[in-house]
Amino acid sequence: MTSSEEEIYQQCLTLNDYQYAARKTAMFPRPDEGFPAYPALGLAGEAGEVCEHIKKAIRDDSGQITDERRQALKKELGDVMWYLAAMCSELGLTMGEVAVANMDKLADRKERGVLQGSGDER
């Protein structure tokens, strides 16, 4: 790790800190408390924007990620994180617990030799 990477790493928020900070900026319609429709739709839209940048890198930049596109992707990925944090909050989950559950699931799949393949219940 370079010294600038180390500096950035030490300044990084935990997932739960990020979620808490993001919650302070969450201003969207809530038909019912705990119903994550708005952040779910926002997450899908922002993920689509990430995919658009990758598509354009293939089409316009010979499959390379330019510095300009990397910066645009960083912004879009930040939007994806915000909507993920909002969904977690609406569902009464923390991003930390979601991350731990995901790593546990993947470790179990690796141990059983089923990382590759398809289906949630493998």
Image: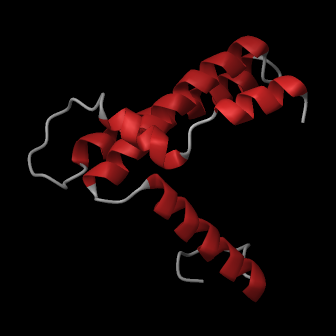
Q: Is residue 22 visible in the rendered structure shown here?
A: yes
At 32% from the left and 37% from the top, the residue drawn is 23
The C terminus lies in which quarter of the figure?
A: bottom right
Q: Nearer the viewer, residue 29 or 85?
A: 85
Residue 25 vs residue 45: left or right? left
Q: Nearer the viewer, residue 98 or 8?
A: 8
**Where does residue 73 sit, x and y in percent of width and height?**
62, 25
Q: Nearer the viewer, residue 43 or 24?
A: 24
Residue 93 vs residue 16: left or right? left
At 48% from the left and 62% from the top, the residue drawn is 98
Q: Is residue 49 visible in the rendered structure shown here?
A: no
**In the picture, residue 51 is in which quadrant?**
top right
The N terminus lies in which quarter of the figure?
A: top right
At 27% from the left and 32% from the top, the residue drawn is 26
Residue 111 vs residue 25: left or right? right
**Where does residue 95 sit, x and y in percent of width and height?**
46, 53
Q: Residue furthest left?
A: 31
